[in-house]
Amino acid sequence: MIKSINDVVKLNNGILMPQFGLGVWKAEGQDVVNAVKWAIEAGYRHIDTAAVYGNEKEVGQGLKECGVSRHDIFVTSKVFKMGYRETLDMMDQTLIDLQTDYVDLYLIHWPHPELGEVYLDVWAAMERILKEGKARAIGVANFYSEYIERIKEEGMTLPAVDQFECHPYYQMPELQQYCKDNGIQYEAYSPLGGGAIFGDEKLKAIAEKYNKDIAQIVLRWEMQKGIVVIPKSVKQHRIVSNMNVFDFELSEEDSKAIDAMDINTKVTCARPDQLWPDFLKEKEERMANGARF
């Protein structure tokens, strides 16, 4: 039973990771500082950022000003540039920008399969970062199981986390099961589908049944599956509202109803093996044909 925002999952190296956190993708400037401080004031202890977001300095400022010890907050960041040396250099810059000596979780942001298996060189650098204590755990984002299998085949450290777009319309059940089978924590970015879920009548009906809003229903659904969620918001009322998911439990019937909404459609990001222009064109074509997203 998920009881509070203090609930954690144990990663495969023994590190405890809060199951609920704040994402800051597409947030900028003072909005980021405020969001981090409001979230921590509300009880959040997990903040997710990335070098490519361009807001690590603001996250660092928020952490510095929040009044809670750095050691009590779980901080995730990600490396986007590919290469052994590039990864080490980006880690050092991330620590400077975040004003910290370490991150709790460091992820490869994208596998870049068009570059071959360069992600294996990046992973070797990640292992060094872990060994040096600059990260307490290392993982991946946007990785299909075959990329993780290559890491395993090389006899390298098993990723602790795979962060992937996940919401009712894009669930990747096979990848979720692969992660469970291999002791890898599944984490949902864009857990609310970039807002695409809010016009859904099926979700609205379920939300009314529990006297909750759609965001709370979807976040609860994901958490009951054991998924870590990091909904993004820069609005204080929404940051507080999103965490109002600990006083109810979805029935098996309602959970299965949401499971059945999967249409294997990404909403916010390209697939790992897809170029961004192709993703944007695909999304535009869907919407031109009457799709909501």
Image (spheres, rainbow, N blue to C red):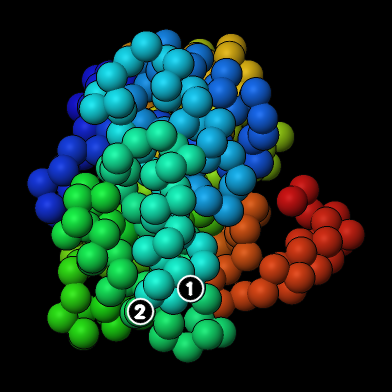
Nearest the viewer among 6 and 173 is 6
- Residue at 43% from the left image edge and 42% from the top image edge: 96
Point out which mark residue 277 bears: none
Whichever of labels 1 and 2 marks the residue nearer the N terminus, that label is: 1
Q: Is residue 208 left or right of residue 253?
A: right
Q: Residue furthest left?
A: 14
Point out which mark residue 121 bears: 2
Quarter where residue 141 is shown? bottom left
Nearest the viewer among 56 and 178 is 56
Residue 77 screen position, x and y as percent: 42, 47
Can the viewer see residue 71 in this picture? yes
- Residue at 83% from the left image edge and 66% from the top image edge: 285
- Residue at 56% from the left image edge and 31% from the top image edge: 58
Please, what is the three-letter code of the amino acid marked with disc 2?
Asp
Q: CA distance from mark 1 to mark 2?
A: 8 Å
* Residue 73 higher or lower than 235, as above or below: below
* Residue 107 higher or lower than 147, as above or below: above
For numbered disc 1, what is the local secondary structure?
loop
Please, what is the three-letter code of the amino acid marked with disc 1?
Met
Residue 119 screen position, x and y as percent: 40, 77
- Please name the residue that numbered disc 1 is placed on: 82
Picture quarter with the N terminus: top left
The answer to whether the residues at label 1 and label 2 have Cβ atoms under 8 Å apart is yes
